[in-house]
Structure formats: structure tokens, C-alpha cells
Image (cartoon, rainbow, N blue to C red):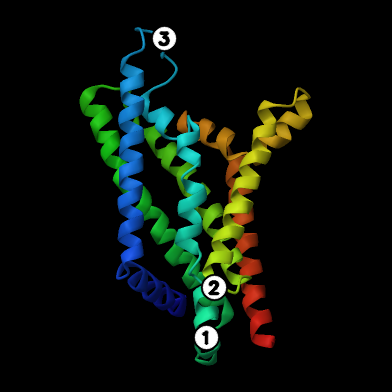
Amino acid sequence: MRVAWTVARREVWSFFISPVAYVLLLVWLLFSGITFYYLVVIFSSQPMGASATASPLSLFFGGTTLFYLPLFLFAPIMTMRLLAEERSSGTLEPLLTVPVSEVSLVIGKYLAAMCFWVVLWLPTLVYVWIAGSAGQGVLDPGTLGATYLGIACIGFFYMAVGLLMSAVSRNQIVAATLTFLVLAGIFLLGLGGYVFTDEEARGIFEYVGIWSQMEAFSKGIVDTRYLVYDLSLALLGVFLSVRAVQANRWQ
């Protein structure tokens, strides 16, 4: 694990000394800030009691498509360089010749990706504070913890998908494109829960859907089925990434 932490620190350092990181954070802050302001304005304009089951925070954290759509762009950008850049620049092979195993390399890259994910969502705590100060439907600590747990689980899943696509791609553009297509495809698949009338089919689609997952977590409901689903896919993505790096070494 010490080697994995070293790889993670190297990756985080190289990411945050590049202008891409700050452009990404600036765009995210602008988008999330505008989205939160827009939801607060809409919520405030509703008649008293019309939005008793919702709040600006619950809408912001998964209640609208504005939560999910930017993630299809930000997640690929955050993960596209993890392994694809090493391969395209020719540094992957020399890196694997030093005492760094494939497992340590992949886990280190994955830890760095999760660090990017945490940094992306830390500023949203300001919106929680603003909502609490203004009395705009502040979340209680349990619901707030469940909401951020749901965001963390989505991060485990999304970062693993991005890592895997980066591991099997020859360059960053291909990695980002594949990640976008996979994440968007899974999201659209989950929308089947709102389309099909058959209870069994609806339950299956809702289970794989990120929207239904965040709806539950944002209400303070910690459904262990979603935890198992996200963590299982994350472990699968990391495992397949290790196998992809090993296959590259054999070649």
C-alpha cells in the first residue's frame, strides 16, 4: 500500500500543477453555483406547502438532470489521463520496470481519482451552509451524511469506469469518449424504471439507475443494495484495470 500511496501522491501533484485542474474546478464551481441559485429561486417562487416534500438541497443533490449531466463530462476529464497518458507518452513501460506492481499502480491511480472526486464536491458544503442560514430546507445531519455517502458511492463507481476506460485506451481522447458513452448508457438504462410498467422490470432498471439511487440517499435512506451495487462495480473496474495493465506488460 505504501507504493500505491506514492503513486497516488504523484498523480495528484501532477494533476493539480496543470491548468486543466483549475479550469475544471472553475467550470464546476460556476455550473454548480448557477444551478443552486436557479433551484433556490424556483423553490422560493412556489406557494407555501407546494414543495413540502422537496428543498433546494434535495433538488440539487440528484433531484434534477442538472446533477447528472455534468458528471458525464467531468468524470471522463478527471480519469482520462490516469493510464492512457502514461501509455501514449511511453512512460507506462518504464514505470512498470521499477519495483511497482500492476496492483499498486492501479490502486494508486484509483486513489488519486477519488481524491479528484472529493475535491470536486467539497465546495458544495457551502451550499448546505447557505441553505441552513437562509432556512431553505436545510438537511438534518443524518440525511446530509446519507446524501454525501451516495455521492461517494457514485464516485467509487464512476472513477472505476473511467480508470478502466483509461487502461484500455491508447490516448486520452478515446478514454474520455468511452467513459462518457458507458456512463451515459448506464444512466439511460436506469431511466427504464420510469418507463416500464412491469413491476419486476421496473425494479431491475431502478436498481441499476443512479437517479433512483440518489433519490433514496438524498432522503436519508441508506439502501445497502445500492452500496453493494456500486462497490461491486468499483471492484470489478479496478480488477479489470489491473488485468489490462498486465496484458500491456505481456505485450
Mark 3 neighbour density, 10 Å: few (under 14) some (14–19) many (20 or more) = few
> Which one is in front, 78 or 88?
88
Q: Is residue 154 left or right of residue 228?
A: left
- The kind of residue tagged 2 is Ala
Residue 50, numbered circle? 3
Query: What is the x, y in percent for residue 146?
Result: 45, 37
Outermost residue, front side: 173
> Which one is in front, 174 or 86?
174
- The kind of residue tagged 1 is Gly
Residue 84, numbered circle? 2
Q: Quadrant of the C terminus?
A: bottom right
Residue on which the image places disc 1: 90
Taking the spot 43% from the left edge, 66% from the top edge, the residue there is 112
- The kind of residue tagged 3 is Ala
In three-dimensional space, the C-alpha distance between marks 3 and 2, rounded to whole angstroms, equals 49 Å
Q: Earlier in the sequence, mark 1 or mark 2?
A: 2
